[in-house]
Amino acid sequence: MKLFDSVGPNPKVVRMFMAECGVELESQDVDLMGGENRQEDYMKVNPTGTTPALQLDDGSIIAEITAICEYLAEKEGGSSLIGSTAEERAETRMWVRRIDLGILEPLAGGFRYSEGLPIFKDRMTTLPEAADGLKGLAQEKITWLDGQMIGKEFVCGDRFSLADVLLFCFLEFGGQVGQPLNEDNKNIKAWYERVAARSSTQA
């Protein structure tokens, strides 16, 4: 298998997940800043033009970070990061969905339409007028999640999961692009510091 990798929070989610699972793969860097992901050769790999993408041994491609992570976990015979029981897997997927839609999407959109506008304006439809609102929505959901984290070590309680990997990578990215953690969200701040201490965050 081969991972088409690049800069950005999405590829980091997969790399961090792989590090947690002890998975090593051949990788090929895609020059995202130079627009290589929008060129014909890469569009043949992944027609959405996004990274990462996973090329399987038969040459077929899996894209989208949660699909890649779940596939890799299955190939390894399962992973507690997805869940060891039907109930744990459902819980992980529930939180991944909530975090993805409520925090990741508006955070990323807020970046693309403001600080990232010079990069994205010629690659996709952008809505600069929506940037501040999207950033606000992301912060609102982070504050909501802060309330859900009372008494919990990780998003799924005492079990570290894909939901934590996903959230960490994007909150780290947010801090780099003008959307820092609100210091008032003390539960999220403490959780972030716990996750940041894991060696997998260096992947």
Image: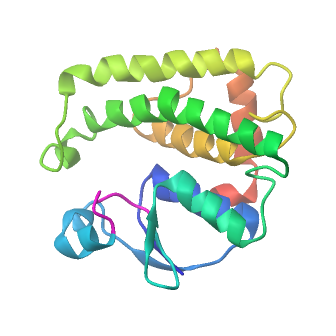
Magenta: main secondary structure equals: loop
Q: Image point 60% across, 16% down: which residue?
A: 143
Q: Quadrant of residue 7?
A: bottom left
Q: Determine whether, in the image, residue 47 is placed left or right of residue 63.
A: left
Residue at 69%, 28% (x, y): give it. 189
Q: x%, y% of residue 62? A: 47, 66
- Which residue occupies the foreground of this view, 86 or 177? 86
Name the residue furthest left: 122
Q: Position of residue 61 (x, y in %)?
A: 43, 71
Q: For residue 8, which quarter of the picture?
A: bottom left
Q: Position of residue 36 (x, y in %)?
A: 24, 68
Relative to 174, is 199 on the left or the right?
right
Looking at the image, residue 6 lies above or below residue 188 = below
Q: Is residue 130 magenta?
A: no
Quarter of the image holding residue 110?
A: top left
174 over 149 or under it: above or below: below
Q: Position of residue 80 (x, y in %)?
A: 81, 54
User: Which residues lie in the magenta part?
Assistant: 46-53
| Residue 53 makes an appearance in the image | no
